[in-house]
Image (cartoon, rainbow, N blue to C red):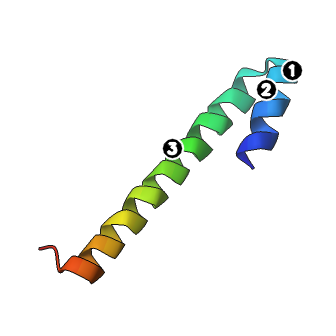
Amino acid sequence: MLDFTWKLFSQTGNIDTYLLFKELEREAQEQGNNETYYLAERDYHVL
């Protein structure tokens, strides 16, 4: 999904598409951080 929104933005220059791209990128990073925390908590019993 990120690739599609970036390609669409690069072809159109539409600012709304760029903002959507940044929002999706941020959500993907947050999910990655949550998964990392979950694994650390599960494997190493982080308090």
Which residue occupies 59% across, 35% down? Answer: 22
How far, Cα to Cα, is label 1 from label 2? 5 Å
Q: Give the residue drawn at x 74%, y 31%.
A: 17
Counting other residues with Cα less than 10 Å from the Cα at mark 1, is it few (<14), some (14-19), or many (20 or more)?
Answer: few
**In this view, 1 is above or below 38:** above
Amino acid type, label 3: Arg
Mark 3 or mark 1: whose residue is earlier in sequence: 1
The quarter of the rendered structure image containing the C terminus is bottom left
The answer to whether the residue labelled 1 contacts the one labelled 2, judged by CB atoms less than 8 Å apart, is: yes
* Count of numbered badges drawn on the protein: 3
Label at residue 12: 1
Across and down, in percent, residue 39 comes to 35, 74
- Residue 20 left/right relative to 45: right
Amino acid under disc 2: Phe
Task: Find numbered disc 3 in the image and state the secondary structure of the residue it sits on.
Answer: helix
Q: Which residue in the structure is indicated by mark 3?
A: 26
Kind of residue sitting beneath label 1: Thr
Do tag 3 and tag 2 residues touch (Cβ < 8 Å)?
no
Find the distance from the CA under tag 3 to the CA under tag 2. Answer: 17 Å
- Between the residue at mark 3 and the residue at mark 1, the CA separation in whole angstroms equals 22 Å
Q: Position of residue 10 (x, y in %)?
A: 81, 22
How far across and down, in percent of the image, does residue 8 sit? 84, 31
Residue where numbered disc 2 is placed: 9
